[in-house]
Image: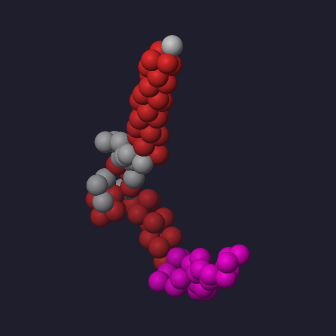
Amino acid sequence: MKKRLTKIGIAIVLLFIIGMGFAGNYFYNVGINRSQEGPNLHGGGSSAAAASIEGSEEQQAKIAALMQWTEQQKFEIVQMKSYDGIKRALFEEP
């Protein structure tokens, strides 16, 4: 009887360890591991320079206007103090 309970206990522990291994691998692949297919950024080009060459003149004009507007903005540093007294800058000037 004692040997049987020991074998059942060992089997349960092994099944638990194997199950945790599969679950850990699954969540690692979902949350951390990158897939081979990256997002299609900049119209499919490999860089922003490639995208500007491949884009139409209208798209290039919109991007240029957006970049000009962004460079003209005045940014301020915003800080937040956490419950334990640490100050953290949420945005810093470039």
Q: Vertically, is 93 above or below 53?
A: below
Residue furthest right as drawn: 83
Residue 26 in view in this figure:
no
How many circles with numbers are drawn on the protein? 0
In this rendering, would 83 be left or right of 15? Answer: right
In this rendering, would 49 be left or right of 87? Answer: left
Residue at position x 37%, y 46% in the image = 34
Residue 3 image position (x, y, % from top left): 45, 17
Q: Vertically, is 3 above or below 30?
A: above
Q: Vertically, is 17 above or below 77?
A: above
Residue at position x 30%, y 60% in the image = 47
Answer whether residue 14 is magenta in the image. Answer: no
Q: Residue 42 is drawn in which quadrant?
A: bottom left
Residue at position x 48%, y 77% in the image = 68
Q: Vertically, is 18 above or below 28?
A: above
Residue 64 in view in this figure:
yes
Residue furthest front as drawn: 2
Range of magenta residues: 69-94
Q: Residue 88 is drawn in which quadrant?
A: bottom right
Residue at position x 47%, y 29% in the image = 13
- Depth check, front residue: 88 or 53: 88
Answer whether residue 72 is magenta in the image. Answer: yes
Residue 10 image position (x, y, % from top left): 44, 25
- Depth check, front residue: 19 or 58: 19
- Depth check, front residue: 20 or 83: 20
Q: Residue 51 is drawn in which quadrant?
A: bottom left
- The colour scheme used to paint the residues is secondary structure
Residue 40 image position (x, y, % from top left): 39, 47
